[in-house]
Image (tube, rainbow, N blue to C red):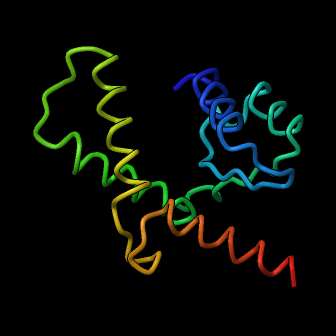
Amino acid sequence: MPEELVVSALRRALLSRQPAAGLVIHSDRGGQYCGNAYRRLLTQRQLVRSMSRRGECYDNAQAESLWSRVKTEVLLGRAAFASVAEAQAELATYFDYYNHQRRHSTLGYECPHTFEQQALLSKTQLCLT
């Protein structure tokens, strides 16, 4: 996976979400996450880089679990996509479902979007009191 792919994805996420400075960005120890352009973007946006410890796959358990779900729920039994565009569309549809409809036991059986909205509301209410 080239560094530019990771930088491009992070830029899109930052434009979409507009996170506050200090957000922790976690990754494994892949070379693309150690590159100059990636680190420069984190520094410019005042984001905190967090990386798994060497040889500790459990440090990245949530991401590994997500990709396991993608492989099981989207890719299992599929030989290949007809095109890159088809793969992008299929994954976009899946991630929309995963974030807005699929319930997660670790989130009290809420979908990630609802859980995040409730957490933001709670945080706002705490700030107002």
Residue 89 image offset from top left, x and y in percent: 33, 27
* Occupied quadrant, residue 123: bottom right
Q: Is 26 left, or right, of 84 in this rendering?
A: right
- Identify the residue at image location x=86%, y=76%: 127
Instruction: Out of 38 and 117, give the one closest to the viewer.
Output: 117
Residue 32 image offset from top left, x and y in percent: 63, 31
Q: Is 67 left, or right, of 1 in this rendering?
A: left
In the rendered view, would you say 58 is above or below 4?
below
Residue 61 image offset from top left, x and y in percent: 48, 63
Q: Is 23 left, or right, of 104 in this rendering?
A: right
In the rendered view, would you say 49 is above or below 15?
below
In what quadrant of the picture does the C terminus appear? bottom right
- Identify the residue at image location x=42%, y=72%: 110
Instruction: Out of 122 and 8, give the one closest to the viewer.
Output: 122
- Identify the residue at image location x=38%, y=70%: 104
* Occupied quadrant, residue 126: bottom right
Residue 38 image offset from top left, x and y in percent: 74, 31
Instruction: Out of 41 and 111, give the one closest to the viewer.
Output: 111
Residue that lies at the very extreme toward the bottom in this rendered image: 129
Q: Is 27 left, or right, of 23 in this rendering?
A: left
- Identify the residue at image location x=23%, y=42%: 74
